[in-house]
Image (spheres, helix red, strand yellow):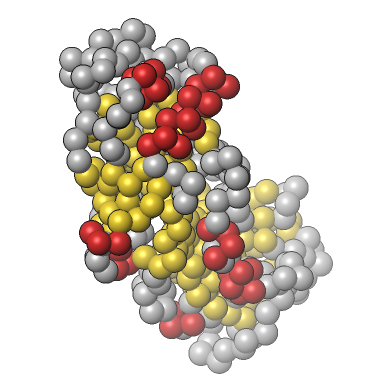
Amino acid sequence: MSTSSNNRYADLGDIFSEVGDISISAPASANLTKLTQRQIPTPTSAGGSSIAIPRPPSRRSEAAVARDRVSPASQIARADSVGSLEFRSPSVGIGSSRGPSPLTIGMSDTIPLAVAFHEIIHAYFKGADESRCQVKMSGDMMISFPAGIVNVLTNNPNPAKLGFRIKNLQHLDNVQPNKQLITIDRLQSTSFSTTLEFNMPVLTATLRRQSEQNPNAPHINVDILKYQIKAKPGAASCPFQLVSYWKCEQRHTDIKIDYKYNCHAMAQASPLLNVSISVPVDGGVKNVQSKPHSAWQGESNRLVWNFTDISQHSESGGVDTLRARLEVGSGPSTPAIISTQFNCEGTTLSGIEFELAGSGYRLSLVKRRFVSGNIWHRFKCEH
């Protein structure tokens, strides 16, 4: 399961809603690129047949059969390496939104900016022991400039210096600024925050070039910072935790999945959205009963549960159990790795904060979100 996409940022909405005395030349709209994900069809009903699955005995087995030759653990070990935090484009990675320029800005106006933080989490659960969970988290930061500032900056021989502070640095590892655009002010940095400043000539040249290449773009988006996030012990850093049990017999397969929403893994408790739990089942599935209702995807031999959202306000407080009995024609089935995906808006895993330093600019919007990368649970086989 992967959420990799070039379009990492959800719609920031009206990014320049606080236009003040800046004149409007077109409707203000900021379609900073939307995260695209492969959606799994939603079940048509929330009901389902109630079944009783025998609780597995206490004897455990570490036997596991992965669907891929490369194990999830080794993939997570490689995920978010130092190399993955490097800026790949020597010409500064920038993406521009499309549409008419929404603002005209005068020389004396403060320039509105928007900031977006996007984070991703990978987690690998093995058995029921949370202390064995492996977690990797990373993030990046983007600043969005209105296209109307280009002429202001290029025509001003001494534009206001643009600087900012990143706070809650104690939760981060391996912070990598875009060295082509910004530098760290070591004298004003501590273990809890760091101050960074733009190279204004480089920024101006970059914005001018992008404006010429995309003359109809209302905003210019600039990748500024990449970082890794320190993981707490065990599964404490994962906002959605899983444990599964399988009972595989000749004619039927019983599956039980316990899940738990963990609000303590994020900076501010927010619902997990578009939650999907996917279970590959082989053995020639002929019939499915599940509680709650699930969708059987015959083309990929997967049993899928979909939830609009899961939070501490859910019916069971975000802690619940999924059950399924599948009739198979060529059993027994082979227990497989369960995967899940979700996204979360309005908060981050790291608690990172942004603060402008100096005058001449103002912060119009800060967008925060995180998404699941690879969230796996390797089966706990019971006989």
Residue found 36% across the figure and 19% down from its top: 155
Q: Is residue 102 left or right of residue 86?
A: left
Whether 190 is drawn above or below 147: the answer is: below
In depth, the one of 84 and 74 nearer the eye is 84
Q: Is residue 31 left or right of residue 106?
A: right
Q: Position of residue 165 (x, y in %)?
A: 26, 51
Residue found 34% across the figure and 40% down from its top: 115
Residue 25, quarter of the rendered image:
top left
Q: Is residue 382 left or right of residue 65?
A: left
Q: Position of residue 144 (x, y in %)?
A: 39, 33
Residue found 42% across the figure and 30% down from its top: 204
Whether 348 is drawn above or below 137: the answer is: above
Give the number of callouts: 0
Whether 59 is drawn above or below 73: the answer is: below
Q: Where the N terminus falls, by quadrant? A: bottom right
Whether 52 is drawn above or below 22: the answer is: below
Q: Is residue 351 visible?
A: no
Residue furthest to the right: 330
Residue 263, quarter of the rendered image:
bottom left
Q: Position of residue 383 (x, y in %)?
A: 64, 85
Residue furthest to the top: 25
